[in-house]
Amino acid sequence: MKLATLPNGTADGRLHLVSRDLSRAAPAEAAQTLQAALEDWAGLAPALEAQFAEVNAGAGDAFNPAAALAPLPRAWQWLDGSAFDSHGALMDKVFGMEDKYRPPFPYMYQGVSNKFYAPTEDVNFRFEEDFIDFEGEFGIIVDEVPMGVSAQEAAGHIRLIVQINDWSLRRIAPLEMKGGFGWVTAKPPCSMAPVAVTPDELGAAWRDARVDLNLNVWWNDAKFGAASGYPMSSGFDQLVAHGAYSRDLVAGTVIGSGTVSNETYREVGSSCIAERRGIEMMDEGAASTEFMKFGDRVRMEVFGADGQSLFGAIDQMVVKA
């Protein structure tokens, strides 16, 4: 299935079923919101699947992905991993933390979840001097996950896959990291692409609880990167199990992959500016690429094997708050 949330004057919007080619949509009959659907996924999924088939057969109205909200405009919980080792190694160099402690479990932090930016919504920042950066990620949304699940069990709770832009303020991030607690001011709300998809919609591209597709990134219309989502050191099943080690995960918990990155970053490009700067530091001795300025735009989009946009596009402008 493909699902989207359109604005209706409420904080959570109105859930819609979207056709595979993203051309048509119809209000979901089984649930008003995506959160409601996730809280009773087993009971509601058959009705949603039946209506999804009708939309693919021509029911509903024209769908404009640019008019959609985030699939979950607000969520009970947002947990972000850092599952691409090539990115982590570069960031350690950028922040001067090559010798830091590396735990025997996935990196993960808990971020802001009361708001996810809509895919074409302008994003407000106070100061360019905070070093504004985008971070292209894949993410998943779960139904209710009991505490202590194994990775194998956790895989069965992954209901939806999403595409995320995890905004970061790079001037602040290393200061908060070295403080020893975690990120707060360095991590404003994230953005989501307009459409959430069930794992079966990816076909062979959903492999080992990873998205085996390229995340295409453009900065001010110039191609910036096209890294594959497959080379995660921990799959989403492992990230879910880690998040549920000492707590139940409420239905609607969103878990991110961390910035998509490949060992071949010099060939495929990057999903964030900080990584590009890290490459410049290694190759040229100093970083030359600047961070985002007010008026800059970033676009992120993933295409399936058929060439169709899978999640729709994130296409946003950075503006002064």
Image (cartoon, rainbow, N blue to C red):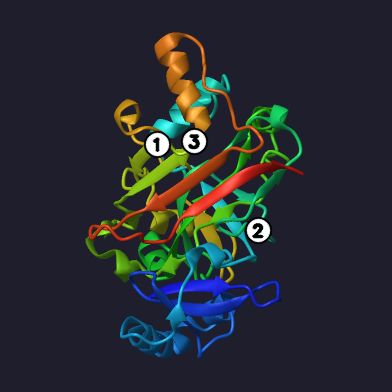
Residue with the mark numbered 2: 113
**Residue 272, numbered label:** 3
Q: Is residue 71 above or below residue 289?
A: below
Considering the image in quadrants, where does the N terminus appear? bottom left
N-terminal of the pair, mark 3 or mark 2, is 2
Please, what is the three-letter code of the amino acid marked with disc 1? Lys
Nearest to viewer (mark 3 / mark 2): 3
N-terminal of the pair, mark 1 or mark 3, is 1
Residue 259 spot, x, y in % from top left: 47, 41
Please, what is the three-letter code of the amino acid marked with disc 2? Ser
The answer to whether residue 142 is visible is: yes
Secondary structure of the residue carrying tag 2 is: loop
The residues bearing labels 3 and 2 have C-alpha atoms spaced at a distance of: 21 Å
Secondary structure of the residue carrying tag 3 is: loop
In this view, the residue in front, 231 or 64, is: 64
For disc 1, the neighbor class at 10 Å (few under 14, some 14 to 19, many from 20) is some
Residue 1 located left or right of residue 295: left
In this view, the residue in front, 52 or 240, is: 52
Residue 6 spot, x, y in % from top left: 57, 73
Nearest to viewer (mark 1 / mark 3): 1
Q: In this view, does 241 lie above or below 132?
A: below
